[in-house]
Every structure is written in C-alpha cells, then in structure tokens.
Image (cartoon, rainbow, N blue to C red):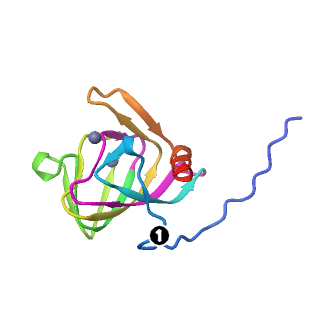
Amino acid sequence: MNEVEHQDPIKGRYVKIDDTNNWKPFPPPFAEGGITWQLLNVSPEMGSWAAIFDCPKGSSFHRHIHIGPGEYFLTKGTMEVRGGEGEGGSTAVAPGYGYEPCNARHDSTHFLEDSEFYMTFLGPLNFIDEEGNTVAVITWEDAQGAWEAS
Ligand code: ZN
Ligand code: ZN
C-alpha cells in the first residue's frame, strides 16, 4: 500500500516589519537601482508568496509576466506599473492598491520617488527578455531559496 507522507499542518504566522533590520537586496538579475525586500511568507497551499519591497527613487524591476494574479498595496511613494498612466498603465500613488491579473506583462515598473509596497503573488513570476523569452521562472520555492541564500 502506498503511504502518503505525513505533513504537519501549516501554522499561522506573524512577521514584524522592522524599519532597519532584515532588508536584503532583491537579486540583481531581477531589479536595479537598489531595491531591497523582505520575504514575509510562502504558502505551499496556494502556491503564493508575499513580500514587501523598498524601492529607492529611480529603481525598477526587470521585465516579467505574472503567471498568476497579484495584489499590491503601495504604502509609500509613487510606482509606475505597465509604463505608468502616460503609456496606458497605472501610476500608483501611496496609499494605493492594485490588482494585476494572470499573464499581466510588466515591461516597465519604475519608482519615481522613494517607495515601498507590499505584494502577494498567486503563482510564479516569469522574467523575460525583450523578445519575450524566459530568463527565469520564480516560484514560491525560488523566492524562498533566494531569500535564504542572501
Ligand atoms: Zn537592468
Ligand atoms: Zn509585476
């Protein structure tokens, strides 16, 4: 008879977000301009992960596609998503909330001033090059690995 491996139930958790401690550089292949982050949680139940990002003025994320939907809460600053309003995207001003659907393509995510936002990713991020070829697919496990390695 096959055995199903016993898994302990996933427990609830609380993470104190401190202003000074525990910020780590977001891996350079995926952003530039000094973005740091804190991975707050990963959920194998949902295939999701949640993080808060500190984004200095002028920083940006590299081109990516959200394989699953994502929700963000901009707690500080100004963030241009999908090129910002001037290019048909969104310009979020704190405090601001946004939803990005499955397959949302983010060619340009820029921060016009020192900013901070929380985001939950339901599924992986697919980082792509200009032609749309996959550079890296970041699942919750990869996010956890990157966080633990840094
Ligand atoms: Zn770059
Ligand atoms: Zn994005």
- Quarter of the image for residue 98 reads bottom left
Look at the image and tell me in which quarter the N terminus lies.
Answer: top right
The location of residue 101, given as percent across then percent down, is 34, 47
Reply yes or no: does residue 27 show up in magenta: no
The location of residue 91, given as percent across then percent down, is 18, 57
Residue drawn where x is 45% and y is 73% of the image? 18
Residue drawn where x is 44% and y is 51% of the image? 121
- Residue closest to the eye, 43 or 146: 146
SS category of the residue bearing label 1: loop
Residue drawn where x is 51% and y is 73% of the image? 16
Residue 102 in view here: no
* Furthest residue in direction right, as rendered: 1
Residue drawn where x is 22% and y is 46% of the image? 82
Count of number-bearing discs: 1
Reply yes or no: does residue 68 show up in magenta: yes
The location of residue 116, given as percent across then percent down, is 32, 64
Mark 1 Cα-neighbour bin, 10 Å: few <14, some 14–19, many ≥20: few
Q: Which residues are magenta?
A: 45-69
Is 26 above or below relative to 132?
Answer: below
- Residue closest to the eye, 107 or 56: 56
Disc 1 residue lies near ligand 2 with CB under 8 A: no
The location of residue 108, given as percent across then percent down, is 23, 44
Q: Which residue is mark 1?
A: 21
Decide if residue 48 is on the left or right side of residue 97: right
Name the amino acid, label 1. Answer: Asn
